[in-house]
Amino acid sequence: MKPTPEKVLVSACLLGCECRYDARHNRDRVLERELGEQGLEPVPFCPEERGGLSTPRPPAWIERTGAAAVLDGSERVLTDAGRDVTDAFVDGARGALETCKVHAIRRAFLKERSPSCGVRQTHADGRLVDGPGVTAELLRRHGIAVTGVEGRRDTD
Ligand code: SF4
């Protein structure tokens, strides 16, 4: 009998879902190939859509410093027009964690630089900063290994 493949959480936009704020995707065929070669089963997930935000949607960023402050309740996530979308970002992050628990997922591959999914870098105060996005930070706090993926890579 074939072993059950390990499931991993993957930012849906990296798998071709047009769920970015501008309704485009970041499909990464190199990542898809690598997951396949390792026998990993991707579970696509978009925290911002899960949090109730529409697509397309205005770009948003963490208020000042980073995701830890958002999860600790001392900073908000704001759109470029100043609308408070903190609840949607936190709900989306919690949805990602819940999905990991449901599928016994221990690893996530997330799109770099997103205010939700970024791992090494994210957006705060309208600029690129070092540090994770809201979903990556919550998953990390709960022991999920998060790997940042650039996206838009092709095998050709
Ligand atoms: S980076 Fe994350 S939140 Fe943004 S579109 Fe991709 S999956 Fe959704």
Image (cartoon, rainbow, N blue to C red):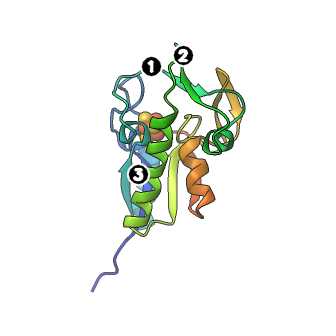
**SS at mark 3?**
helix
Q: Quadrant of the N terminus?
A: bottom left
Q: CA distance from mark 3 to mark 2?
A: 32 Å
Task: Look at label 1 and name its amino acid.
Answer: Pro
Task: Look at label 2 and name its amino acid.
Answer: Asp
Q: How many marks?
A: 3
Mark 1 and mark 2 residues within 8 Å of each other at the beta carbon: yes
Q: Quadrant of the C terminus?
A: top left
Q: Is residue 84 above or below residue 105?
A: above
- Residue 65 coordinates in the image, percent (x, y): 72, 32
| Res. 100 image quadrant | bottom left
Judge whether residue 156 can be spotted in this image: no
- Residue 121 coordinates in the image, percent (x, y): 66, 37
Q: Is residue 81 above or below residue 84?
A: above
Q: Which residue is mark 3?
A: 32
Q: CA distance from mark 1 to mark 2?
A: 7 Å
Left or right: where 115 falls relative to 104: right
Mark 3 and mark 2 residues within 8 Å of each other at the beta carbon: no
The image's mark for residue 80 is 2
Q: Which residue is mark 1?
A: 58
- Residue 98 coordinates in the image, percent (x, y): 42, 58
Q: Earlier in the sequence, mark 1 or mark 2?
A: 1
| Res. 26 image quadrant | top left
**SS at mark 1?**
loop
Task: Look at label 3 and name its amino acid.
Answer: Glu
- Residue 11 coordinates in the image, percent (x, y): 44, 45
* Residue positioned 36% across, 35% down in the render: 52
